[in-house]
Image: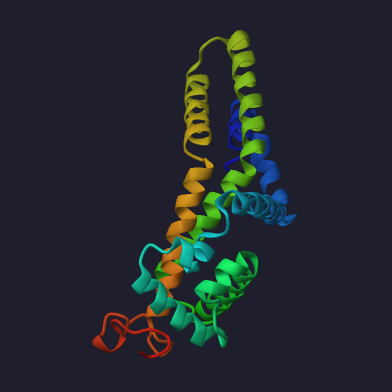
Amino acid sequence: MLAVLPAALISALLTNNRPLVALSPILLSAGTLFLASNIVRVLGQRTQQRLIVKWNGMPTTRLLRFRQAQNSVMLQRRRQALEVLFGAPLPSRRQEVANPRKADEAYVAATRRLITHVRSRPGQFPLIDHENASYGFARNLLGVKPLALVVLTSSVAADAVIYFRDGLTGPLVTVGGLHLGLAAAWLFFIRPTWVRQAAETYAERLLEALDVPPECTSHEQDGSACQATSISGE
């Protein structure tokens, strides 16, 4: 919806919104929005695969590597808790050095088990849900960015045509200003660095789930029984 918003603004300006109002029920009943959301999701996933290569692995994988650890105490604690949840030992430092790719595969598999664990407890990890949604939103916006820029360029061209035809009208000033604001957002804010920041924040929140034992609920996480504990019960 954000990607085609410029064209929608132009349509509203040219048609006074009447055809759009007439077509809206048909488009909604035909599942257009659901189809569009799935297309955007696929574009976001393709973008994610390219970003993983540039990042040298997903942030969750990097946080589990010995060679990129920023806090050795937290790394050891979370690895132990993840091993309990995963049901198998994670690669040792020596194994990671000897075969980094195989070690990363183990980290990805363990992370997926953690994600399943979190999803099986809806409402218990609201911060993880929030950061997951934020990352997915940022990733999908970056994935649809090429389409958005094409639509935006076409809409700005239409602004120019309307200007030469009708002059500088009030509606044109409003729509043109919105187009400039959208152009600034797409060009300067929706960038790979923004997506990476969202991904790293989500990774941190996800691994924090290892500090909460399974029996804790969202209302109990502030209690003393659930403080400074991990899935392993230590």
Q: Looking at the figure, which quarter contains the C terminus?
A: bottom left
Q: Residue furthest right?
A: 30
Residue at the location (44% across, 71% down)?
Answer: 207
Rendered location of residue 143, percent (x, y): 63, 46
Residue at the location (47% across, 38% down)?
Answer: 189
Instruction: Please say if 72 is above or below 5.
Output: below
The mark total stands at: 0
On the question of residue 124 being in view, the answer is: no
Q: Nearer the viewer, residue 156 or 128?
A: 128
Render colour scheme: rainbow
On the question of residue 76 being in view, the answer is: yes
Q: Is residue 101 left or right of residue 218?
A: right
Instruction: Please say if 107 is above or below 1.
Output: below
Q: Quadrant of residue 156?
A: top right
Instruction: Please say if 225 is above or below 64.
Output: below
Q: Nearer the viewer, residue 27 or 37?
A: 37
Residue at the location (29% across, 81% down)?
Answer: 228
Residue at the location (46% across, 61% down)?
Answer: 68
Q: Is residue 224 left or right of residue 179?
A: left
Q: Nearer the viewer, residue 52 or 197?
A: 52
Q: Nearer the viewer, residue 80 or 158?
A: 80
Rendered location of residue 22, percent (x, y): 68, 42
Q: Residue furthest left?
A: 224
Rendered location of residue 218, percent (x, y): 37, 80
Q: Looking at the figure, which quarter contains the N terminus?
A: top right
Rendered location of residue 108, percent (x, y): 60, 70
